[in-house]
Image (spheres, rainbow, N blue to C red):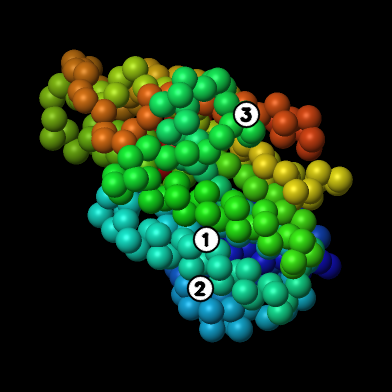
Amino acid sequence: MKKILVLGGGGFIGRNITEFLVKRGDCFVVSADIKEGSNWNELSLNYPAYFDSVLDDFTNIEAFKNLGSGFEEIYMLAAVVGVNRTIKEPDEVIRINTKLTTNVLEWIAKNPVNKILFSSSSENYAATTDLFDSEIPTSEDIPLCIGDITHPRWTYAITKIHGESAFIHSTKKLNYEYRILRYQNIIGPEMGFGHAIPHIVERFVNKLEKPIKIYGHDQTRAFCYIDDAVRGTVGAMESKDQSNNIYHIGNDKEITMEELTKFIGNILGYKDDYEFAMTYPGSVSRRCPKIDKAVKNFCYNPKVNWRDSVIKTVEW
């Protein structure tokens, strides 16, 4: 069996990729993170021949010694995420995310691998679409840029642009194939509370405001369910003759924040009024990916529509 490392395997996308690969039963997966994945115990108990885990801080290069060797593929998903984290600790976002990238590259210089998949973000081009009226849905060849560099919101995007460049331009020296995936608003159970949909749900459930405010009511997003993101991610990694590429992984159905908020309100039985409110600082006006490249190159096919995706997430 091929040996696979999922670095960041305790996070939302990472633990779902880990579970998908382990239950498929044709590879041995080491899932590694600074925090334990909610499914690690179950996988250890039920799939000991296909799974192992390592709990450590991989901003410390010494932690990589605990991983072992002989990996053919690395899913490099480890990162600090969430708008609130960038606002509260922008220096830590930069330190952690850049350190993780440089440590992985330093480690594989002595422990060669065949393929690396780096998880990037739609944040990398958010300022381009907002400031320069670029095409939406947006393709992978769009120039990347940030907005006001003094705003802490952009620290996450800066680290993801750095990561893309680092993994792309280390291939010749370290002799691996890369896939860069720019994830686009992935949602689902256990996604964590540092994102838009959990924030909206909390405001309905806590009943601390009436009417409910809709922040950035005319802004748009395109939401993708976690199961579709996992299939797309593994498809990108395992695609034949499609190495050294950048792909958007998401859904191309664009909805407004007003439509999203009122849909969540209907799910939760909210009967009162709404009012429009100013958007959060640094939030872009539109975001929707073009996914044609992934569809063509490895038959990426999101199956869960945005309404069902939101229902599943709200139920969680």
Rendered location of residue 50, percent (x, y)? 72, 68
At x 51% / y 73%, what residue is drawn?
58
Find disc 3 in the rendering and name its residue. 139
Amino acid, disc 3: Ser
At x 19% / y 38%, what residue is drawn?
206
Res 78 label: 1
Rendered location of residue 217, percent (x, y)? 30, 20
Q: Earlier in the sequence, mark 2 or mark 1?
A: 2
Residue 266, can we see it? no
Dots 2 and 1: beta carbons under 8 Å?
yes
Query: Total marks drawn?
Result: 3
Dots 2 and 3: beta carbons under 8 Å?
no
Q: Is residue 257 above or below residue 113?
A: above
Q: Earlier in the sequence, mark 2 or mark 3?
A: 2
Amino acid, disc 1: Ala
Asked which quadrant contains residue 275, the reply is top left
231 and 57: which is toward the camera: 57
Amino acid, disc 2: Phe
Res 58 label: 2
